[in-house]
């Protein structure tokens, strides 16, 4: 979630300006809860809790749906945001230079996967579910989503860095989730990221999200399959590797062969991972962001600096 200092972001700030609502968000980060459970945990009445939930829903921090309960339908609340960034007005400054490459989901160069698996374009499923052979189908080049239970997918990325350009930071942005049979919001999976054969780190995806439709997922897409993921940003700097600002490992930009003419980026779910819960990768036409994975290599121009 991206916020700024305009009135558009005011509902979020108002929703967060409450100790009760902050505690609600902490509880929902652990698991979905109904109104009665939230009220009991915080010592409030269901009526007051409903008012707090509406405030968080209006800010798009919480989403709710009706589900069968012991005494009829109940309103179940889940956390709707996984992060928030506040963008303050900045003085005009020179924009950082970078080489940016968007990666189509189906433009992988190699894979070794095990079912459950599949891939699809915005118009149709490619081949049939759970048959890895279709990952070599020529239609794969148009895929906007792919998923597998175990193994890896690998991409070759051209590197246009010049000798006069000093690399400063590599940023990979992608929408990811686990891969469960059907869907399961609580389905952890350890996803390993590698670049040029160097392991950058492991991030544990919380689940395979299917509680609601993805914002950009096609209308024909089955409701019982992967709907959306989490937007993750992997950064490799001179100090180490980070995921959404949190340190992932000590691997630095100088250790990964950043000047090679071609970068090899791999996403994998290893056989010996603690949580073997698969991987789903979303691109344009699927998920919540309508973005293909992107690689940005930021640099300083040494020739320009000398001038």
Image (cartoon, rainbow, N blue to C red):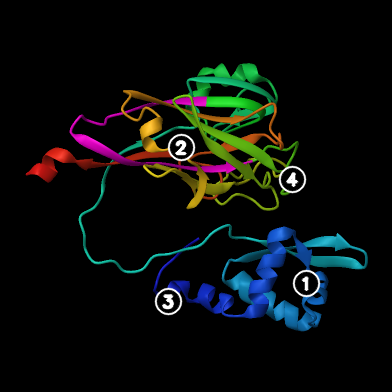
Relative to 138, 213 lies left or right: right
Residue 243 rendering spot, x and y as whole percentages: 50, 47
- Would you call the spot at circle 1 few (<14 residues within 10 Å), some (14-19), or many (20 or more)? many
The residue indicated by pointer 4 is 184
In this view, 36 is above or below 214:
below
Residue 177 rendering spot, x and y as whole percentages: 62, 42
Q: Which residue ends up furthest to the right in the rendered image?
A: 70
Q: Identify the element where label 2 is drawn.
A: loop
Determine which of the numbered discs, if any, sits on residue 259 in the image: none
Q: Identify the element where label 3 is drawn.
A: helix
Residue situated in front as seen by the camera: 83 or 197: 197
Q: Which residues are magenta?
A: 154-177
Query: N-terminal of the two: label 3 or label 4?
Result: 3
Q: CA distance from mark 4 to mark 2?
A: 32 Å
Determine which of the numbered discs, if any, sits on residue 251 in the image: 2
Q: Identify the element where label 1 is drawn.
A: helix
On the question of residue 290 being in view, the answer is no
Determine which of the numbered discs, if any, sits on residue 7 in the image: 3
State which mark lies toward you, 3 or 2: 2
Determine which of the numbered discs, if any, sits on residue 38 in the image: 1
Main SS of the magenta segment? Answer: strand
Q: CA distance from mark 3 to mark 2?
A: 40 Å
On the question of residue 119 being in view, the answer is yes
Residue 208 rendering spot, x and y as whole percentages: 68, 44
């Amino acid at each position: 979630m991206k916020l700024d200092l305009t009135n558009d972001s005011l509902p979020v700030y108002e929703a967060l300006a409450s100790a009760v609502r902050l505690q609600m968000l902490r509880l929902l980060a652990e698991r979905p809860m109904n109104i009665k459970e939230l009220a009991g945990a915080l010592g409030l009445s269901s009526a007051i809790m409903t008012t707090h939930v509406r405030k968080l829903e209006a800010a798009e921090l919480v989403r709710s749906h009706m589900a069968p309960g012991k005494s009829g339908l109940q309103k179940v609340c889940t956390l709707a945001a996984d992060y928030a960034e506040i963008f303050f007005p900045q003085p005009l400054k020179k924009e950082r230079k970078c080489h940016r490459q968007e990666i189509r989901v189906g433009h992988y160069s190699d894979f070794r996967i095990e079912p459950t698996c599949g891939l699809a374009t915005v118009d149709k499923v490619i081949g049939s579910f759970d048959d890895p052979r279709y990952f070599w189908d020529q239609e794969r080049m148009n895929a906007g989503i792919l998923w597998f239970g175990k193994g890896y997918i690998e991409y070759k990325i051209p590197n246009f860095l010049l000798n006069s350009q000093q690399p400063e930071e590599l940023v990979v942005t992608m929408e990811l989730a686990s891969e469960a049979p059907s869907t399961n919001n609580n389905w952890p999976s350890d996803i390993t990221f590698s670049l040029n054969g160097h392991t950058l780190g492991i991030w544990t995806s919380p689940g395979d999200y299917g509680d609601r439709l993805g914002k950009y997922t096609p209308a024909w897409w089955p409701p019982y399959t992967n709907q959306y993921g989490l937007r993750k940003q992997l950064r490799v700097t001179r100090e180490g590797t980070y995921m959404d600002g949190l340190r992932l490992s000590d691997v630095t930009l100088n250790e990964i062969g950043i000047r090679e003419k071609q970068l090899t980026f791999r996403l994998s779910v290893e056989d010996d991972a603690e949580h073997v819960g698969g991987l789903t990768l979303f691109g344009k036409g699927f998920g919540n962001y309508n973005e293909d994975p992107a690689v940005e290599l930021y640099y300083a121009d040494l020739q320009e600096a000398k001038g």
